[in-house]
Image (cartoon, rainbow, N blue to C red):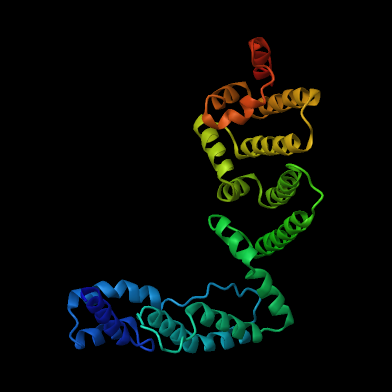
C-alpha cells in the first residue's frame, strides 16, 4: 500500500502538469496546488529536459519561405510532444485508450516537415538526415567541416553502407573471406575520407570511428615526435595485413609478407620510435608478424636501423 500511495502521489503531480505552459508556470501551478516546495524544485530539472523539443534535423538547402512554414509547425507539435512525454510518466492500471507515444509524434512531425519540401529540398533533406548521416555526425562532432565536405561525407557513407549490404548478401565467401572483403571495403572508404580531410582531421575522425586506432594512436602519442601521417600509415599497413592474412593461405609467402610488413613499420616510424612502440601492449600485432624473432637479433637490429 505504501508503494501504491507513492505512485498515486506522482500521478497527481504529473496530471497537473500542463504541456501548453512554460516550465516556470507549471512550477508555480504545482506550488499553488500545495505540493511541497522541495518536491516541486526536485521536479524542475526533469521538466526542463522534457520541454526541449528540437528534432535535431539538418535543414541546409531549404529556402527561407519553407523554413518559415516549418517554424509554424513547432508550437503545435511541441505541445503534443510534451504532453506525450508527461502522459508516459503517469502510471495507469489499464482500461484506457493508449495515445500516441513521443516517438510516434516525432515521426508525424518529421513527415509533416517533409511534405512542405519540394523535390530538390527533399533530396537534400533525405541525404542530410539519413540514419547513416546521423551516425556520421557523431564521428565528426569534433571536426570543422564545410557544408560541401559534409555532403560529400554523407554520400560516401551511404555508398559504403550499400556496399557492405551487397557483400554481406553474397553466399560464396568461405572462412574469413567475407570479413576480409568488408575490411577491404572499409579501408577504401577511409582512404577517401583521408584524402578529403587531410591527415590531422582524419586522425580525429578515425579515433572516434575505431577504438583500435585510438589505442594505437595513444601509444604513439606518448613517444613524441610521431606525426598524424605516420600513425595513419602504420594503421593502414596493420589493417592491410589483416586482410591478407584472411585471403592468402599460410605458407612460404607468409614469411615474405612478414618481412615486408616489419620493414614498412620501421620505415614509417624510424628505428627509435619503433623500438619504443614495440614495448607497448598494442604492438602485439607487430610482434606476431616479426619474422626475425627466435635467435635472429642481429637481423632485427638491421631492420630497425634502416632509414
Q: Is residue 303 visible?
A: yes
Picture coordinates of residue 157, whole percent (x, y):
69, 59
- 71 to 245, vertically: above or below: below
Q: Nearer the viewer, residue 14 or 22?
A: 14
| Residue in the image at 67% along x and 73% along y | 126
Q: Which of the image's four quarters has the C terminus?
A: top right
Picture coordinates of residue 258, whole percent (x, y):
72, 25
Relative horizontal placement of residue 52, taking residue 127 as reference (left or right)? left
Q: Which of the image's four quarters has the N terminus?
A: bottom left
- 70 to 184, vertically: above or below: below
- 104 to 259, vertically: above or below: below
Picture coordinates of residue 294, whole percent (x, y):
64, 13
Relative horizontal placement of residue 54, taking residue 11 as reference (left or right)? right
- 161 to 25, vertically: above or below: above
Q: Is residue 64 visible?
A: no
Q: How many labels does the image show?
A: 0
| Residue in the image at 46% along x and 86% along y | 98
Residue 163 figure quarter: bottom right
Residue 273 figure quarter: top right
Residue 18 figure quarter: bottom left
Q: Nearer the viewer, residue 151 or 81?
A: 81
The single residue placed furthest to the right in the displayed view is: 172
Picture coordinates of residue 203, whole percent (x, y):
60, 45
Relative horizontal placement of residue 92, taking residue 194 as reference (left or right)? left
| Residue in the image at 75% along x and 26% along y | 260
Q: Which of 7 and 210 is in front in this view?
A: 7
Amino acid at each position: 500500500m505504501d508503494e501504491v500511495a507513492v505512485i498515486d502521489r506522482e500521478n497527481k503531480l504529473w496530471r497537473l502538469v500542463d504541456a501548453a505552459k512554460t516550465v516556470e508556470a507549471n512550477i508555480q501551478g504545482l506550488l499553488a496546488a500545495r505540493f511541497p516546495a522541495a518536491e516541486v524544485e526536485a521536479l524542475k530539472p526533469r521538466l526542463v529536459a522534457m520541454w526541449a523539443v528540437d528534432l535535431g534535423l539538418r535543414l541546409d538547402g531549404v529556402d527561407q519561405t519553407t523554413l518559415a512554414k516549418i517554424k509554424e509547425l513547432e508550437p503545435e507539435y511541441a505541445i503534443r510532444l510534451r504532453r506525450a512525454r508527461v502522459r508516459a510518466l503517469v502510471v495507469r492500471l489499464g482500461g484506457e485508450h493508449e495515445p500516441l507515444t513521443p516517438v510516434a509524434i516525432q515521426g508525424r512531425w518529421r513527415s509533416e516537415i517533409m511534405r512542405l519540401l519540394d523535390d530538390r529540398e527533399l533530396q537534400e533533406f533525405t541525404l542530410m538526415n539519413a540514419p547513416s548521416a546521423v551516425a556520421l555526425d557523431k564521428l565528426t562532432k569534433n571536426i570543422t567541416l564545410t557544408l560541401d565536405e559534409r555532403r560529400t561525407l554523407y554520400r560516401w557513407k551511404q555508398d559504403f553502407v550499400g556496399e557492405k549490404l551487397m557483400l554481406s548478401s553474397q553466399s560464396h565467401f568461405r572462412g574469413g573471406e567475407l570479413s576480409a572483403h568488408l575490411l577491404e571495403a572499409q579501408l577504401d572508404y577511409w582512404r577517401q575520407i583521408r584524402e578529403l580531410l587531410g591527415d590531422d582531421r582524419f586522425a580525429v575522425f578515425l579515433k572516434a570511428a575505431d577504438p583500435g586506432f585510438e589505442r594505437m594512436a595513444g601509444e604513439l602519442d606518448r613517444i613524441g615526435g610521431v606525426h598524424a601521417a605516420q600513425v595513419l600509415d602504420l594503421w593502414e599497413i596493420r589493417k592491410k595485413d589483416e586482410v591478407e592474412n584472411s585471403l592468402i593461405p599460410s605458407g612460404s609467402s607468409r614469411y615474405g609478407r612478414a618481412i615486408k610488413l616489419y620493414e614498412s613499420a620501421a620505415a614509417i616510424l624510424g628505428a627509435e620510435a619503433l623500438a619504443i612502440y614495440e614495448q607497448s601492449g598494442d604492438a602485439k600485432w607487430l610482434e606476431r608478424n616479426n619474422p626475425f624473432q627466435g635467435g635472429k637479433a642481429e637481423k632485427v637490429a638491421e631492420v630497425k636501423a634502416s632509414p
